[in-house]
Image (tube, grey):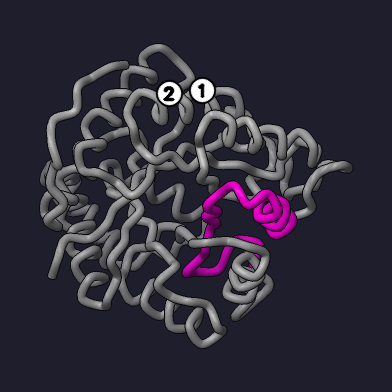
Amino acid sequence: MSAPRVSFEFFPPKSLGASFQLWETVQALAPLKPQFVSVTYGAGGTTRKLTHEAVETIHNRYGVNVAAHLTCVDATRAETLEIADAYARAGVTEIVALRGDPPQGQGRFTPHPEGFADSCELIEALAARAAFTIRVGAYPEPHPESRGVGHDVQWLKRKFEAGADSAITQFFFEAETFLRFREECDAAGIDGTKIIPGILPIEKWAGVRRFAERCGARIPAWVDEAFDKAIRDGREDLLGRALATELCTELMEGGVQDFHFYTLNKPHLTRDICHALGVLPAGHLEKVA
């Protein structure tokens, strides 16, 4: 098998120490020549300004194709599209268009009175500008707000009909989860090759477990048991590296050619997994941050 294409997700720093960590992560992973990297928003759009600054810095200083996250949360349509237009003026031509999580303390998403009602409305508005490659979210397992079997696939189809170019999935633990979802998407008329599996390298199982429970990612019993033993034996990071590498290998055997890694601004596990998959540095990158 040939080496896959990869992309990486970062989050914007909120402190000086976190800034150094982000730039060290970019420094470590940029030589792998990702197709793109994405930079997230905080819940409720809390890191909007920081996201914009991180996107422009990575774009300008590292020469990496950056996809900026953009959400519908707590902003008018005009405000949201002005952010998009500012990215376009800065030469950033990829956006990850999301509804977004509600602000802390709010149980459910409530649209701004003058804002976009959902991700499809945002996608349509961005597509009308004809200035961006638009990536969206996808859920191989039911979203916490899913209305039942098939709802997530149909919602993803609406996103593509609205103008999305590709989708990145929530993380999952077994290859069959993604491959089954891709088959369901193909059956619904969605081009499965446009769906990129999201991979979360596991460094600390306790935190990942809590996150999985919140976002609806099913935790197989064997994964729980394996990490319980690995933690007792002091091999948690080794297990995380092995499981992610095996997951990607199984997906490649199923025809997957692209992976999006949720790095959590920690490059080492992701870099090691990429190396194991045959994704190697294309050259030395001078540190400029």
Give the quarter of the image for residue 88: top right
Give the quarter of the image for residue 224: bottom left
**Vertical side of 230 occupied by 59: above or below:** above
For label 2, count other residues whose C-alpha is less than 10 Å away and answer few (under 14), some (14-19) or many (20+). some
Label 2, label 1: how far apart the Cα atoms are: 6 Å
To which residue does mark 2 refer?
57
Q: Out of 35 and 248, give the one closest to the viewer.
A: 35
The mark tally for this picture is 2
- Give how far across and how far down residue 18 sits, in percent: 38, 20
To which residue does mark 1 refer?
53
- Give how far across and how far down residue 286 sits, in percent: 19, 22
Q: Quadrant of the C terminus?
A: top left
Extent of the magenta region: 120-146
Q: Residue at x 18, y 64 (%)?
A: 246
Q: Out of 33 and 130, give the one closest to the viewer.
A: 130
**Vertical side of 110 occupied by 4: above or below:** below
**Vertical side of 189 occupied by 20: above or below:** above
Q: Residue at x 50, y 79 (%)?
A: 185
Is residue 220 among what the camera can see?
A: yes
Q: Residue at x 54, y 48 (%)?
A: 96
Residue 51 counted in the magenta span: no
- Give how far across and how far down residue 172 sits, in percent: 38, 62
Q: Are marks 2 and 1 in contact (CB under 8 Å)?
A: yes
Three-letter amino acid code at the position of disc 2: Thr
Residue 121 counted in the magenta span: yes
Q: Quadrant of the N terminus?
A: bottom left
84 with respect to 232 (left or right): right
36 with respect to 129 (left or right): left
Q: Out of 212 and 70, give the one closest to the viewer.
A: 70
Three-letter amino acid code at the position of disc 1: Glu
